[in-house]
Every structure is written in structure tokens, then in C-alpha cells.
Image (cartoon, helix red, strand yellow):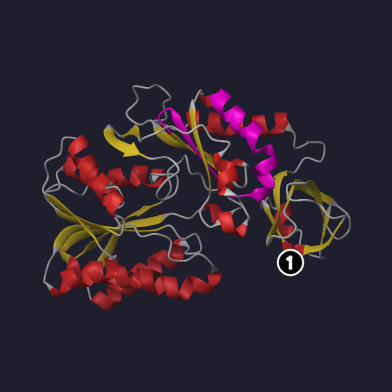
Amino acid sequence: MARLKHGREKHILQGHPWVFSGAIAAWQGAPAVGAVTDVRAANGQWLARGLAHPAAALAVRLYTRQESQMLDEPFWAAVLGRALARRRQIPGYDEDAAAATNAWRLVFAEADGLSGLIVDRFADTLAVQVGAAALLRFLPGLLDELRRLTGAAVVHVDAAGDDATREGLDAASLAALARPAAGPVRIREHGRLFDVDPGSGQKTGFFLDQRENRQRVAAYARGRRMLSAYCYTGAFEVHAATAGATDLLGFDRSEPALARARAHLQLNGLDTPATYERADVPPALRRLRDAGRTFDLIVLDPPKFVANRAQLAKGLRAYKDINLLALKLLAPGGILASFSCSGLVTPMLFRQMIGWAAADAQRPVQILETLGQPPDHPVLAVFPESEYLKGAICRAD
């Protein structure tokens, strides 16, 4: 049991799924990592039940607010079942193998009541990311239930990003729980084909969170020369070329990702002139600016620049700098599609950053569309941390 300090129960009563070590006044006993733990207010009021990681900053992850509910196998199976049932209610979701899209996020951690677990489906393959050491003791049962619910024969299991170090996760132990397959998995997204290596590269192997945004950006692509910065495996370009973009230039630091981007254009039968260059994006943008190059459509989809609050100011400057460079490269009437996946950069800060870049560029910039996460990446209303992806489609005159 964890007893909170006086006055630290408010956010839990509101439904927030995390308890930080600084909010805990005392532990009863010495719970092991993954121990089922009740959380009580300073006055003894029962608040919630979760899994403990006493040595971590995020000391308890909460999973139920019902005192009579045990965190046992039937509980985890029910939570997984609800998450998958929600996906079936999303317009366009289709488990049929003939569907135009067959890659979705099935479980989105806290937003689905499963703090520390992300599950993406790529055709008949699951990519599972574990972000909580406390969840490990239940992971074999969760994986079995996922296989039963989805019928997936292939499962990749990995630690989620920085959580491997922060949570003390052993990647080798996680991999032993997987049923991997050799080679890439071919998926469809709005009828376009992509090859994905689940569990490798960035995130779970493909940016499923940009699925709808790629369609929105492509709607502006006809007749435009496109620059894609941080292009990864070229999904934005495939959709833009399909929609009629006339020329493509992509930058990324990963040569394997660029090779896959080139292959994706060929895979989809697209003969749009395309150049992909291995480059660090800010210097590459400055080089284009100094050469007097211009583009009609620019996509900025950078990695997370802000991992913690100490990095916020520096990260915002980095976002502003690449957006400023992009605005200097846009032809009059050009379209800038800019994104941030840093959760600590709020939608308001993101819009302010675009304003700073517009002011420094001395160009009138209109925000035409505000973009975010697709519905298989839902935002939990009482958990703002689950809203991480921000985007804007802008026009610069």
C-alpha cells in the first residue's frame, strides 16, 4: 500500500493514471516491482489500485478505481477486449484482409487503461512496446490474450523508447516473449503499399499516428514541388505523389530509411522524379536557402525535440529554427505542413512557435488546418500527456 502526502490525491480522484514518488508519504512494507498496490489518501481513503515500481520516479501506475476489482487475468483480458472493441467502432476500421487500410494502433497505453503498453497491428503482425517494468509479470498472459483476440501469428515485443533505461527493462527478456518473423511486413494505408519492419527503426516501425495527416497534406500536393524533411521511409511522399506532386526531395539521417523510401515509390508504381539524401536536416535546409531553392510544399516531421521540461525552451527554439528555414524556402502561396511529437509542447505553444517563425521570416502565414492524432490514438481527457502529436497546414504568402 502507498499512502499519499496531504493534498496529493486531487489528480487521482480526477482520473489521472500516474502516482509519482514525490507524492507518496510512506509505503507499507517493501513492495517489489510489479506488486499490486492500493493507493490511499493521507486520511486513509482508498483511491485506486495499480502496480508499483518503488525505485522509479513514476512509482505507481493505476489501472482501476473499483476497490473490489482485482488485477488478475480476467481483468487484463477485459481491458484488452474493450480496447480492441473501441477500434472496431472507428469509421474506416476494418479487420477484413481486403481493406484499404490494415495497420492500426490497437492499444494506446494510458488512453486505453493499460499504462505502459502499446500495441500496433501491421496486417497479421503485432508490434508490442512495453514501457513499464511493473507490467512484466503480467506480460505473458497479455500477449496470449492479444494473440487470441486478433489471431495474429507473429508478435514483436520491445521496450518503448527511453523507457528501457528509465524503467530498467531488459530488451533480451522481452524479445524472448516474441514470435518474430523474418523480413518486412507489407501493409496498406489508404490503398498505398508500405513495407514495415515491426519493432525496428522508429516507434514500432512505422508512424501510424500520421495516417490521416498524410491524406490531408496530400490534398494540397497536386502540381507542387515537395520537400520532405525527416522523411523516414517516405510515406508522406507516396501519398503526395499519388495526389499529383510534381517533384520530391527527401532528407533523413538514416540511409536504410531512405532506401525504403525510394523502394516505396517503386512499390506503388509512382514515377514522380524523386531525390533522397542522407543529411542532418537544419544544415541541409540552410544549404538549400543559400542556393536560392524554393518549394511549393514542405513537410516538417521531426523527431521529439523535448523529452523533459528542462529541454522545453531549447526544444522550442529548435522547432522555430527549422520552421523559419522552411518558410524561407517556400514559394509565394506555398504550403508548410509542420508537426511536433513532443508531448510537453502543448498545442498552444506549437501555434506560438509557428507565429515566432512567421514573424522572423517576415511573411504572412495563415494556419489552414490544425492536425493531431487519429482516433486509434485517442486522448484521455484527464491525461493531457496522451495528446502528443500536433500539426498545422499553413500557407505563406
Residue occupying the point 69% across, 60% down:
56
Q: Nearer the viewer, residue 122 or 227?
A: 122
Residue occupying the point 77% across, 40% down:
66
Q: Is residue 141 left or right of residue 109?
A: right
Question: Does residue 246 belong to the magenta stretch?
Answer: no
Residue 107 image position (x, y, % from top left): 54, 39
Residue 392 image position (x, y, % from top left): 34, 57
Residue occupying the point 36% across, 39% down:
196
State whether residue 111 appears in this view: no
Q: Nearer the viewer, residue 210 or 8?
A: 210
Q: Nearer the viewer, residue 132 or 341?
A: 132
Counting labels gives 1
Q: Is residue 191 left or right of residue 248?
A: right
What residue is pinned by disc 1?
Answer: 22
* Residue 79 sits in quarter: top right
Q: Residues within 10 Å of mark 1 (few under 14, many from 20)?
A: few
Q: Secondary structure at mark 1?
A: helix
Quarter of the figure with the C terminus: bottom left
Residue 234 image position (x, y, % from top left): 26, 47
Magenta: predominant secondary structure element?
helix
| Span colored in magenta | 122-149
* Residue 323 sits in quarter: bottom left
Residue 51 image position (x, y, % from top left): 73, 47
Q: Amino acid at mark 1?
A: Gly
Above/below status of 147 relative to 210: above
Q: Is residue 129 left or right of residue 6?
A: left
Residue occupying the point 32% across, 28% down:
100
Question: Does residue 127 belong to the magenta stretch?
Answer: yes
Q: Is residue 67 left or right of residue 332?
A: right
